[in-house]
Image (cartoon, rainbow, N blue to C red):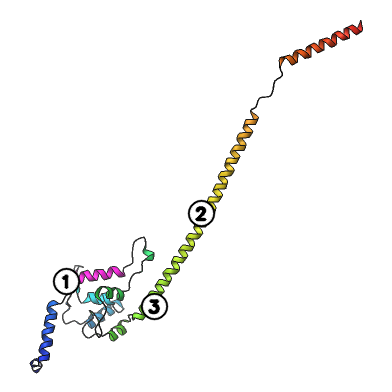
Amino acid sequence: MCEMWTTADEWRVANRNKQNRATQSMPYRRGRTSHYQLMNDFSHMHGRTPHRLEVFKMGRCKDLPDGSESWVDEESRRRYDAMTQMIAPSSDMDAESHTPATPEDAFISVMGKDRPGRVRCAGSGETLGTWYRSTGTPTTSERERIMQEQLKAQEDKLKAQVEEMTQMREMISRLENVATKVDEMSILLSQIQASQAHTQHVPPAHRSGSDSDSGTDEAADDYSDHDDHVS
């Protein structure tokens, strides 16, 4: 062991690791407990394999007896909150159009993609192959397929909504036409009723006084003629 420290390469690696630790943010604070042990304990407790966000929290947050959480630093808490918000369903009015991100996509969006041969925040001994096989996390092509299926489902849903709105507009247009015709019939009926009422209230024509007098004179003449004929 002592001979290893006599080589220049070992000194160089040790110095580089020391510098990296000095500038490291969001350090792992579970002491000698490895990620494998934490993940195994989680699997026994919950009956499933933890996802990336849960693994990230395991190594940087400790649950206290009073129910609160103790994070190693504020940056770890901030990034975890950002990832949690991305996978949480939306409670706004446009919840139907909002598709929550998967834990894997949320982790990559906040923490960055995994570099070759290394899985971020999963321990030094974890590789891409061992991680994705053990967690069952879908690969990039699988995630793309899932996203395409989700987009297709959203498109079909939007098309159905557009078709429903078109049918509603057509129904509203028909109802407006019926209402217009009803208004026209109501106006016409009112006009007919007004005309009939005006006709019923016209007074009958009266005969003049001269016509009555002439009739009396004619009767008198007839009477006089009749008297002359008798004598």
Q: Amino acid at mark 2?
A: Ile
Q: Which mark is residue 172?
A: 2
Q: Which residue is mark 3?
A: 145
Labelled pair 2, 1 in contact (Cβ < 8 Å): no
Q: Earlier in the sequence, mark 2 or mark 1?
A: 1
> Helix or strand or loop: what does disc 3 sit on?
helix
Q: Which residues are magenta?
A: 68-89
Is 159 above or below relative to 55?
Answer: above
Is 167 above or below relative to 71?
Answer: above
Q: Amino acid at mark 1?
A: Asp
Q: Amino acid at mark 3?
A: Arg
Q: CA distance from mark 3 to mark 2?
A: 41 Å
Image coords of residue 172 (percent x, y): 51, 54
Q: Earlier in the sequence, mark 3 or mark 2?
A: 3
Q: Is residue 167 visible?
A: yes
- What secondary structure is the stretch in magenta mostly built from? helix
**Is 166 included in the stretch rendered in magenta?**
no
Q: CA distance from mark 2 to mark 1?
A: 60 Å
Q: Is residue 63 visible?
A: no
Q: Which residue is mark 1?
A: 73
